[in-house]
Image: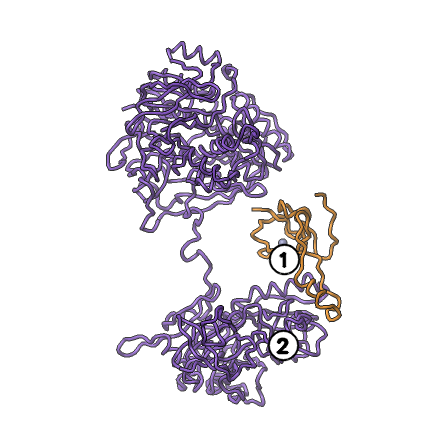
Chain colours: A orange, B purple
Amino acid sequence: MQLIRCPWCGSREEVEFHYGGQAHVSYPENPAELSDAEWARYVFFRANPRGPLAERWVHAAGCRRWFNAVRDTSTHELLAVYRIGEPQPEVAR
Amino acid sequence: MTRVAAGGRIDRNTELAFTFDGKAYRGYAGDTLASALLANGVHQVATSICYGRPRGIMAAGVEDANALVQIETPFPEPMLTATTVELYDGLVARGLQGQGRLADLPDQARYDAMHEHCDVLVVGAGPSGLMSALTAARAGARVVLLDDQPELGGSLLASRNQLAEWVSAVTSELNSLATVRVLRRTTAFGYYDDGFVLALEKRTDHLGAAAPPAAARQRIWRIRARQVILATGAHERPVVFADNDRPGIMLAGAGRAYLNRYGVLGGNRVVVFTTNDSAYTAALDLADAGAAVTVVDARTEIPQHPAAECARRGVALKAGHVVTGTSGNGRVTGAHIAPYADGKAGARQGIGCDLLLVSGGWNPTVHLFSQARGKLRYDESLGAFVPGSSVKAVRVAGSAAGVFTLSGCLSGAADAAVAALQELGLSSAPPALPSLDAEPETTPGLVLWAVPDKGDESGPCRRFVDFQRDSTVADILRATGAGLTSVEHVKRYTTIGTAHDQGKTSGMIASGIMAEALSTDKHQVEVASLGTTTFRPPYASVAFAALAGRDRGEIFDPVRVTEIHPWHLEHGAVFENVGQWKRPRYYPQRSAAGSIEDIDTAVLRECRTTRESVGMMDGSTLGKINVQGSDAGEFLDRLYTNLMSTLKPGFIRYGAMCGMDGMIIDDGTVARVSDTEFVLTTTTGNAAMILDWMEEFAQTEWPELRVNLTSVTEQWVTIALVGPRSRDVLASVAAELDLSNEAFGFMTWRDASVAGIEARICRISFSGELAYELNVNAWDGLALWEALIEAGKPYGITPYGTETMHVLRAEKGYPIIGQDTDGTVTPQDLGMGWVVSKKKLDFIGKRSFSRAENQRPDRKQLVGLLPVDRTVLLDEGAQVLATADLSQLPVPMLGHVTSSYRSAALDGTFALALVRAGRERIGQRLHAWQDGELVSVTVTDPVLYDKEGARRDG
Ligand SMILES: [Zn+2]
């Protein structure tokens, strides 16, 4: 079982966390102005790389705070964790 | 008796009685069932699963693929290896004839789990593990050392007391340190991420009936280690030859362990068939114990030291020979040996023997390392895979790392510990190595997987690879002949490696035989390129009872009950599970004659009483979320499809929430408490999900909004008081409250004292009737319930459960999110376009409503269905068809029934359904398909009762 470092609580076991999908997919400024295709892209499409991916996680059974993490999808290694609002850190692969 | 006169680590003063296959035997404390059987001359233990061949004991540890037994007493357990069952007084076992038998009585033993954290975890307490643990312990690290045996020492226990004093000194030192935990009888069975290792401790298995009932029989250790050292040793590998499965044929190291550790000489005329030096120790030890020994070595060049030692003892040595087959009816009586050159065996001759020891080399036990995502490297000289990459915070020491000299193991293990300590920032001085006798120089072994066979593979002579699965060389050749080239495919085709032992003695050999089979004159297939099958946890069998631990029965999953639960129990409610909640489904009445109402009668009665007079329901499980903050209104506007910020304190609004895709995810009421506070309700089963959903938006998308969310589900008890006489009932216990429509209108709330209890009363209705929802502090809930029941008596009040609630709401066409919807349904599909605000610029899901897909006129829409025969109850889930003509396949399906009930008010059955272009079909005749028959139905508006809403105000 992996350890995940909550930016508020420190390292905790992964069962305390829930996954929240790709991070930094922000809600469009004005959805009404988007074409159906553009809106569908926002609603349904997410990156699926092999390698680092910025993701949302929530410390569901702990402080209940959401945060972002960069995870290598091929090894599951969490390369960085950072708070909501902080810029995505550069990570070495 | 084959027990030698003296020696071994058994306690000859403690005799133990046991029964095997119905016969009584005696053994000693310190025996395993296997060693005790051998001591009694019992070699045949089991019968093979496919061919019914007699099978014996092939190993002295967990790797045994053969000696499966069924334990009968004290508790039936199937499929244990005789080599891992410690003997206890009163043990009753029998050899497995094929499959085991599961217990048919409940296991009364306790199982539990422990969480442990340490700096250094050392797995395996052989010479390497002891050295690593000692090094780490002396540096002050918190150490956990675990080993599957009852005493520490590992491979040294099978020796003639080699380093015995050192082992006992190290054991005492480790036991004396508060920073060290030594776990015996404990098997690490899985390495997970970040130093997390699961281990199974067998705490009282070895005590049999004498096990104290209060002590946990087995315990799962959940160990989180900053550094892990794997000193898991190696398993000896057999060589495959014809009829290699007879009782009396065992691994050379096992033969030595039975002699030196258990004082059992497995045979008097012994043939040792080897391809490497290691088996000579066994040959020499058995010869010294009085056996007549012949060594058959596949190598033509025999190293000087073992050759000289053999000569000194009169041990016959057949260099350049192999065993090609065996004789025997049951136990082995002879070995067929033949000269071996250029990969071919020559003319055979027989040697009589009653024990045949085999060694084809050693496979490092790399299971945990591989589970830690360590890469393996094929070592050609060992004919085995060894750790081939570094893994963060994991080190491998000793023979698990492919080191096969004692001095090399000890120094390597100390080095591994020093390196681990360094990463922990602990300085260390490795302890002095114990002094060792000079070890003879080892010479490389010959890698030989299977002795070539001229015999007919389909005949009675078989070359077994996986004994437990009765899989042979021929099976592998059949697999490769069928075109399989991957070890994973061959494993599944032949089942090699899928038994309880997971191929510990067979997997490597199978890869080797495959490589040879796939190689042609032009193209050599290397074992290295075939690799191994995946080493999945668990390393050894783990009982489900141990994994479950204490989380079984009532505490398997939490059960949530409301404060009024005791009353429901007392009044005979029948419960249903809603998520983790126990909710009353209905309250069957007992007649004077003692008969109990069935569900249909009870529900019809509850419905009728409620619609005609008054009923009440415990609605406490409803999800309740308190939303506070200066931006609370704005926040709810963004989440709900309708406007909440314009709601005035004291008022309530129904609201729906959609996902980003415009599909409805929940609905409920929103009550405004003050300018900065709302209380909203969610569907019972959705409460946690909706809170998470809201929290995610509050934290990630709109962190600028000042809003806080708290679940208050369990803080409030909620009672629905429903029916035309509900006002009268409430008036009798809330004298100070003006209950007139003018003073207390629909969709408003008031705080008032009810039967002396402070209550928040909401005028909302989920049934279409005049209704009040009373919310009180949880601890007052039962008192209020009882007061209302009492106050309702003059009106014949009935408590009702979820079933009646469902009927009443369905008669009114109110959908239940998650029952009448399935994540593909918009508010418009439900006919609730009115709940979608046209004023708001945006809210979650709004943009999706205008997508072409969501505008299609032929979307599935919620409608009512009335069976033409109003006694027929439609099945929920039944498909709805446009035509009764089933000759044209596929029959076009229009949708399905989502809710279906018998109704007192409608005097017959009715249903709700999602039907393609349903609203256009109102009045049409459709058909539902259930139980192989068509049921004709008429499509109606979903609201079937009191369309005008005349009953709402009483
Ligand atoms: Zn946290």
* Relative to B89, residue B447 above or below: above
Q: Are marks 1 and 2 on the same chain?
A: no
Mark 2 CB lies closer than 8 A to ligand 1: no
In this rendering, would B584 be left or right of B140? Answer: left
Q: Is residue B186 visible?
A: no
Q: Residue under label 1, please give it.
A: A20
Crowding at dot 2, Cα within 10 Å, few <14 / some 14-19 / many 20+, comes out as many
Q: Quadrant of ligand 1?
A: bottom right
Residue at (60% x, 47% y) in the render: A3
Which numbered disc covers residue B672?
Answer: 2
- Of all chains, the one bearing label 1 is A
Looking at the rendered structure, the kind of residue marked 1 is: Gly
Are the residues tagged 1 and 2 within 8 Å (C-beta)? no
* Secondary element at image label 1: strand
* Whole-percent x, y for residue B42 in the image: 29, 29
In this rendering, would B477 be left or right of B847? Answer: left
- Of all chains, the one bearing label 2 is B
* Whole-percent x, y for residue B99 in the image: 34, 43
* Whole-percent x, y for residue B747 in the image: 58, 82
Taking depth in this image into account, of B834 and B635 the one nearest to the observer is B834
Taking depth in this image into account, of B634 and B34 the one nearest to the observer is B34
